[in-house]
Amino acid sequence: MDVRLLSREAIEAPKWNGCVHYAANSKIYGYTWYLDNVAEDWVGLVEGDYQSVFPLVFNRKLMGIKQLYKPLLCQQLGLFSVNVCNQERIHHFIEAIPSEFKFQEIAFNDGNKSVLKLKDASIQLKDNYRLDLNQSYENIHQNYSKNVKRNIKKAWKHDFFLNSNLKPEKFVAAVKKAQEEKGVRHPDALYHAAHRIIYNCLHRGKGVIMTAEDHTKQLQSAIFFMFNGMDMVNLMNVSTAEGKDKGAMAFLLDAVIQRESNKRKFIDFEGSSVEGIARFYKGFGALNVPYYNYTLNKLPWWLKWSK
């Protein structure tokens, strides 16, 4: 199998992106423009004339040693291929990772199931919930949990309405404010990356910010969806304290589900390992489609403890 390592500058973006687009396990995170906006630096492993591609995102934050890491807002990477992602192909790519990367952490996408058979690395299953919209709204609604149905009923009493004209800056600011009010502090780099990704998606027609507002046009909840093939990916969402009490997020998601039902689409909720969030997503009838966190530590013994 002809696999070669290419620098970012040497990668032919149209061919790379064509592979990601036509791969059966396509994910929006694998496109060059997406990686350029979330990664400090990255190179790529390529099979043949871009029949398969495998991004390697790295930095040198550990005493100058190159390490592969999981970039912000980039849930799943690994191997993308127009060929079958079988065990042999995946292992061949893993063996092609240069030994200079002494520490390797890669989130393999849910189409790379054969990674589970690796013996020399730590493999951890990560939860991700997806809702199949290719059925009637009545069928989907029937599978809502009692809590989701209760929140939707509560929301209808407050005359919320939908909108899609919220500016990315205001959306990201609302996300940051809500997280900090809960005591969650992310690095500013995450919010800067969110701005870049949202603008890139909107520019390419690959995303939308959906909001639920009250009669005074005050924001109650909002979601940014990225579009990739049949997937509507929930990259970020937010509810105000008032919106949470009034069931605004359940109202917003239910409205999206009503509009998109009976179409060959999925809502990809992007997680979560947080029990309360996972329970909320499962409450819409979403099923767990796990992906695989791969960790290989070949650091010198005196540095291994840091990881």
Image (cartoon, grey):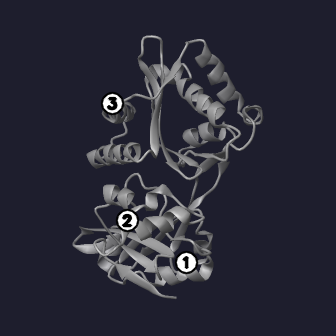
* Residue 130 locus on image (x, y percent): 62, 48
> Residue at 37% across / 33% down in the picture?
171
Sequence order check, earlier mark of 2 and 3: 2
| Alpha carbons under labels 3 and 1: distance apart | 41 Å
- State whether residue 218 appears in this view: yes
Instruction: Tell me the quarter of the image containing the C terminus.
Output: bottom left
Q: In this image, 230 relative to 239: left or right?
A: right
User: Which label belongs to residue 69?
Assistant: 2
Q: Amino acid at mark 1?
A: Ile
Nearest to the observer: residue 273 or residue 207: 207
Sequence order check, earlier mark of 3 and 1: 1
Sequence order check, earlier mark of 2 and 1: 2
User: Which label belongs to residue 90?
Assistant: 1
> Residue at 32% across / 47% down in the picture?
196
Nearest to the observer: residue 139 or residue 176: 139
Which residue position is annotated with label 3?
Answer: 170
| Alpha carbons under labels 2 and 3: distance apart | 29 Å
Q: Amino acid at mark 3?
A: Lys
> Residue at 58% across / 25% down in the picture?
251
- State whether residue 119 appears in this view: no
Nearest to the observer: residue 109 or residue 231: 231
Q: Which of labels 2 and 1 is toward the front?
A: 1
Q: In this image, 194 relative to 142: left or right?
A: left
